[in-house]
Amino acid sequence: MQAIQAYQCFCDETRLRILNLLLEGPLCVCHLTAIIGVPQPKVSRHLKVLRDGGALETERCYNWTICRLPASPSPLLEANLKCLQDLRAEEPVFKTDLEARKRTVERILSDPCDDLPSQIRSLAKDCC
Amino acid sequence: MQAIQAYQCFCDETRLRILNLLLEGPLCVCHLTAIIGVPQPKVSRHLKVLRDGGALETERCYNWTICRLPASPSPLLEANLKCLQDLRAEEPVFKTDLEARKRTVERILSDPCDDLPSQIRSLAKDCC
DNA sequence: CACAAATATTCATTTGACAGTATATTCGTT
DNA sequence: AACGAATATACTGTCAAATGAATATTTGTG
């Protein structure tokens, strides 16, 4: 049953943290990984679960993978993303993640010594 | 995290079927069991998951257990019960369960040879 | 008190989810 | 072609979830 797969997306803290971050806008995998501070393979696997459950769309740019919430979310997804926003008030992780996101984005955009290729820098500007 | 436990309730077909039935009103365990046609211990265990996740309230009457949706559902539960109603159009199980529910309730209320004690009969009238 | 019905719980088994580690893949750069 | 960064996948171990079968518990009845 399709709906069950969709609900699975919300049954793991790491996945909820990822969705919470993406509510603010797209992020690439490496930034997601840096922000929530868990091993990259773990993030990658959870992203797959989210994609399979219809809660995530990814786009490949060079060797980056940009993650964003679906452009046309299902009613079920939409309702629960709303619930997730309400959860921010109850669960401190979500707020600290948002702060970490802000710091990460600012660092990417402001550090002139950052060794990101220029194409990737402008990509970061778009998606962060 | 509390929310994860709540979402677990929606990650199993049997549990979704139970919630779908309870949207129409309370039912006791034995009727639930008869309607969805799965072994009684299985139903009982899923009911426990639903109760622990805040998606179910039970009340003991004699040796019957009346199951109903919470009187004050959380916003998360409320939103997803609404989603569940929409799911009826997509997943045939939910409709056939509702038909089975109707037949079961009618049988209980109309059969004069039913060996239910009178107290339980009137209880059935209340909750079906 | 013995018994039957409704329900819950225990036990053993199987299946699936999650994690860490290592490795493969993809893409751009030198 | 070699290399490095970003990402995905494979492998393995561990633990939780789900199930069937059997049993315990509760409650009313004869």
Image (tube, coloured by chain):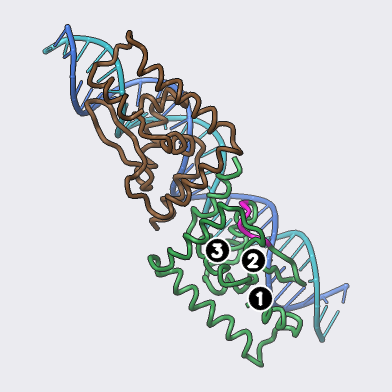
Chain colours: A brown, B green, C blue, D cyan
Q: Which residues are magenta?
A: B53-57
Q: Is residue B68 visible?
A: yes
Mark 2 lies on a secondary structure that is: strand
Instruction: Look at the numbered discs 1 and 2 and tell me whether their residues touch, using CB distance below 8 Å.
Output: yes
Residue A38 visible from this viewpoint:
no
From mark 1 to mark 2, how far is it between C-alphas?
9 Å
Residue B56 lies within the magenta run: yes
- Which residue lies at the image location 48% right of the left edge and 35% below the top edge? A17
Please, which chain is the residue tagged with disc 1 on? B
What residue does disc 1 label? B127
**Residue B64, magenta (yes or no):** no
Q: Are marks 1 and 2 on the same chain?
A: yes
> Which tag, 2 or 3, sits closer to the chain's start?
3
| Numbered circle sitting on residue B41 | none
* Classed neighbour count for the residue bearing mark 3: other residues with Cα under 10 Å, few (<14), some (14–19), many (≥20): many
Q: Which residue is mark 3?
A: B19
> What's the amino acid at mark 2?
Arg
SS for dot 3: helix
Work out whether B1 lies above or below B8.
above
Label 2: how many Cα within 10 Å (few below 14, some 14–19, many 20+): many
Residue type, numbered disc 3: Leu
Mark 2–mark 3 distance (CA, rounded to whole Å): 9 Å
Compared to residue D5, the image places residue B128 above or below, namely below
Q: Total marks drawn?
A: 3
| Residue B128: quarter of image | bottom right
